[in-house]
């Protein structure tokens, strides 16, 4: 049975919003919905790049990153509803550059590489939207590289928390909470740091009432956004 609503759902994905209905219908023809279990791998580093994925809905996320030989992990990015991922290998034809794992409950659509490339070649609006998306991600990657080279770990953590807060957060009576669950190890993976070092910073922030952290549910609450933004700005000259 064909999924008549899939084209409509694809039209709500940021990258595809400028596409005409006919192009969305072609994309939807070969695509399929998937709802992987929590912790399920979507693809691994070195796998063939045979599809891109779009996040349709869900309070979960997709974690994209890479391991090293010592079982340490680097979390490259976290994707949520409205995002696409897996496009790099599809565009250059090379194997996957990272792993992708589902965290929590999330509904995705898998679009075969052939269908995506055909749409990119025939629809100028998609090509322009894709260029803008890749430019934005390249800017973020450059910023992360610059931070890793020059910024103290506390400043880098503050910047990551502010980035995640802006991307998806929930106002509560305890403060502004990151919408997704982040274990302390997850936050360490975002920075290529040790979990112990992240715990040390979070403990200092909690002692100064900057944040609170629910260790059981892995929820981080920001109690003072202005002060956290000041930490993210880094030390002033002469300070």
Image: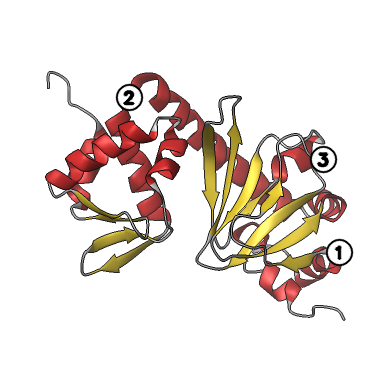
Rendered position, 193 above or below 24 = above
**Which label's residue is closer to the chain start, 1 or 3?**
1
Q: Are marks 2 and 3 in contact (CB under 8 Å)?
A: no
**Location of mark 1 (residue):** 30
Could you say where residue 97 lies in the image, as x and y percent from the top left? 69, 34
Q: Nearer the viewer, residue 194 or 226?
A: 194
Residue at screen point 52% across, 62% down: 60
Kindly tell me whether residue 2 is visible in this rendering: yes
Of badges 2 and 3, the one in the foreground is: 3
Q: Are marks 1 and 2 in contact (CB under 8 Å)?
A: no
Answer left or right for 73 relative to 92. left
**Location of mark 2 (residue):** 151
Residue at screen point 87% across, 81% down: 1
Rendered position, 185 above or below 22 = above
Q: Nearer the viewer, residue 37 or 208?
A: 37
Could you say where residue 147 lies in the image, as x and y percent from the top left? 39, 27
Answer left or right for 89 relative to 76. right
Could you say where residue 239 lies in the image, as x and y percent from the top left? 12, 22
Of badges 1 and 3, the one in the foreground is: 3
Q: Are marks 1 and 3 in contact (CB under 8 Å)?
A: no
Q: Residues within 10 Å of mark 3 (few under 14, many from 20)?
A: some
**Location of mark 3 (residue):** 48
**Which label's residue is closer to the chain start, 2 or 3?**
3
């Amino acid at each position: 049975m064909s999924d008549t609503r899939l084209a409509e759902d694809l039209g709500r994905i940021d990258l595809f919003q400028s596409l005409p209905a006919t192009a969305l219908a072609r994309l939807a023809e070969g695509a399929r919905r998937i709802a992987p279990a929590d912790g399920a791998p979507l693809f691994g580093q070195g796998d063939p790049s045979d599809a891109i994925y779009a996040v349709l809905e869900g309070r979960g996320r997709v974690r994209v990153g890479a391991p090293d030989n010592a079982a340490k992990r680097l979390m490259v990015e976290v994707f949520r509803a409205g995002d696409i991922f897996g496009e790099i290998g599809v565009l250059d034809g090379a194997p996957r550059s990272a792993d992708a794992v589902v965290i929590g409950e999330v509904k995705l659509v898998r679009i075969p590489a052939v269908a995506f490339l055909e749409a990119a070649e025939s629809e100028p609006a998609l090509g322009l939207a894709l260029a803008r998306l890749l430019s934005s991600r390249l800017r973020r990657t450059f910023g992360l590289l610059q931070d890793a080279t020059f910024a103290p770990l506390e400043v880098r953590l503050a910047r990551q928390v502010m980035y995640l807060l802006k991307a998806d957060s929930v106002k509560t009576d305890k403060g502004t909470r990151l919408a997704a669950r982040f274990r302390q190890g997850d936050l360490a993976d975002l920075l290529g740091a040790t979990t112990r070092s992240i715990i040390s910073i979070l403990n200092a922030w909690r002692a100064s009432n900057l944040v609170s952290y629910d260790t059981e549910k892995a929820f981080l609450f920001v109690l003072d956004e202005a002060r956290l933004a000041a930490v993210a700005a880094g030390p002033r000259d002469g300070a």
